[in-house]
Image (cartoon, helix red, strand yellow):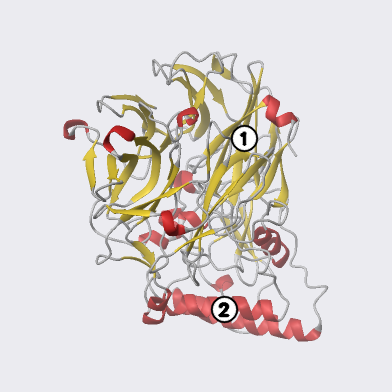
Amino acid sequence: MACSYVLSPNAAKLNHSFAPSDLDAPSPSSSVSYTNHRRRKFSTNSVTDSPALLNFPNYPSPKPIIPEKDTSHWNPLQRAASAAFDFAEAALLSRERSQPLPKTVDPRHQISGNYAPVPEQSVKSSLSVSGKIPDCIDGVYLRNGANPLFEPVSGHHLFDGDGMVHAVKITNGDASYSCRFTETERLVQEKRLGSPIFPKAIGELHGHSGIARLMLFYARGLFGLLNHRNGTGVANAGLIYFHDRLLAMSEDDLPYQVRVTDNGDLETVGRFDFDGQLNSAMIAHPKIDPETKELFALSYDVVKKPYLKYFRFSPEGEKSPDVEIPLASPTMMHDFAITENFVVIPDQQVVFKLSDMFLGKSPVKYDGEKVSRFGILPKNAEDASEMIWVESPDTFCFHLWNAWESPETDEVVVIGSCMTPADSIFNECDEQLNSVLSEIRLNLKTGKSTRRTIIPGSVQMNLEAGMVNRNLLGRKSRYAYLAIAEPWPKVSGFAKVDLSTGEVKNHFYGGKKYGGEPFFLPRGLESDGEDDGYIMSFVHDEECWKSELQIVNAVTLELEATVKLPSRVPYGFHGTFVNSADMLNQA
């Protein structure tokens, strides 16, 4: 197979699509061919004159999927402005490429191997299945991930990639697969302009060059060359089915509605603002209460106050007024938790300090002087006056798996993976990353907290990405299913952890197979216990370079079925399952 990159004035366009005979990908060491396209007429060290940053696995490219840059609607002033901005960007790129990139934003590290992007895949049906898919699995398993359409021209973090949803539809034991980009406003405009013209929030917005990129971006908007008013997000992190809609989310924008078609394909409906009720970004991990069916969410702002807002939606999609939560500084808030009566909000030590960009630094930093704390707020609160803050020093949980109330001790119990160093995902450091499954108890009367490691030290392992039975979200749960993130950042299997005893049972994929988030699907209304269900996870074999969907019995941890996938599935983020009845009722 061969992969062709077509280089525009600003970037390499990754034109990758599968030919019918090219469903089995080669090893990741395969080469990539490049073609110069519309080379600049002026002399400068543009990206087209620079060596490619990446060595992606080979993919066929019989026809480009990105159209030519469309400037037909531009007037002479806009054309002149565009040329000037392109020239300035080329000079900026030349300067950036003279400096080494840290691994946290170096695309050669961030999206190499099976983190590299793949093309869209139309529906492939009647897939080969080993074993037997349980009869109760009837619907579509979906997983989100970052998949950059364009080859990065500068810094790139894994979280910067365009959102792509991978879907396996299962009906009567028959399985089909497809994957599609979520057509965000950002992606649609970049396709039209032929280059990755929107700044990358983590990979590019740091130091003086980040300020320059922002100035170029808004200058292009001022001249009408692009439109940033309809969002700049990538919708690559979370997925949730709510209010008859499948929503793809990242915390930098409103959610996007994606529709699952009857045959298992995916279509982007558009940016979803809940009929005009939502006018700010929503984090990628909203929570649905399993009993009330309400959805709870947060929105944070890194530029202006209020830095944090809380809101909720009724099952019919009616939004509550925002509750503004006072914070001293904008804070990274990727996740939170709910209990039966409260929302639990982490205010931790990874913060945003945009002024550091003027000093040539990253705006995402670890604030060692800040004390981590959790805020406990009644779900139906109308303002933040009822918030109870409980300090939990040196606690940073990127994800919280569950929380519940313990009335007999006046505590809220929070289950999360405590990560150290706290900012290691965003900033390079020499210290080894650890992600320790922990129980944090927040006393609402004394304002004190305790924290204990759930798994004994003798079997300690990095556990990151996973879930509990969502029918018990906000209620006391016994089991958590978590990715074994070893060797970091790869996932060699998943652990079933008894949260009360610390007992761990592991399912390893074996050999050179690695996966991602284990998704727990209850067996159905007739389920016999909390763990009566199945774990679903995409798994990739780095020896033969093939991917599959594994379905594992959550009680016994025995492999029930394996669905062989027609193309490679990169390691990604979070997933969900939409049953067949809900598919029929999509808005």
Compared with 12, 295 (above or below) is: above
In the picture of the structure, the residue carrying the numbered disc 1 is: 167
Q: In the rendered structure, which amino acid carries the disc numbered 1?
A: Ala
Q: 231 or 564, which is in the foreground?
A: 231
Q: Quadrant of residue 507?
A: top left
Let me know if residue 29 appears in the view. Answer: no
- In terms of sequence position, does the residue under pointer 2 or pointer 1 come before the other? 2
Check disc 2: other Cα within 10 Å, few if <14, some if 14-19, many if 20+.
many
Compared with 282, 21 (above or below) is: above
231 to the left or right of 74:
left
What x and y, as percent, mark residue 555?
40, 16
What x and y, as percent, mark residue 372?
29, 57
**What residue lies at 80% left-to-right and 85% top-to-bottom?**
76
Check disc 1: other Cα within 10 Å, few if <14, some if 14-19, many if 20+.
many
Disc 2 + disc 1, Cβ < 8 Å: no
Compared with 384, 527 (above or below) is: above
The tag on residue 89 is: 2
The tag on residue 157 is: none
**What residue lies at 42% left-to-right and 20% top-to-bottom?**
531
Q: In the rendered structure, which amino acid carries the disc numbered 2?
A: Glu
Q: 276 or 386, which is in the foreground?
A: 386
- In space, the residues marked 2 and 1 are separated at their CA atoms by 37 Å
100 to the left or right of 540:
left
**What residue lies at 51% left-to-right and 75% top-to-bottom?**
93
267 to the left or right of 211:
right
Q: Nearer the viewer, mark 2 or mark 1?
A: 1
Let me know if residue 525 appears in the view. Answer: yes
What x and y, as percent, mark residue 516?
44, 37
SS for dot 2: helix
SS for dot 1: strand
What x and y, as percent, mark residue 213?
53, 76
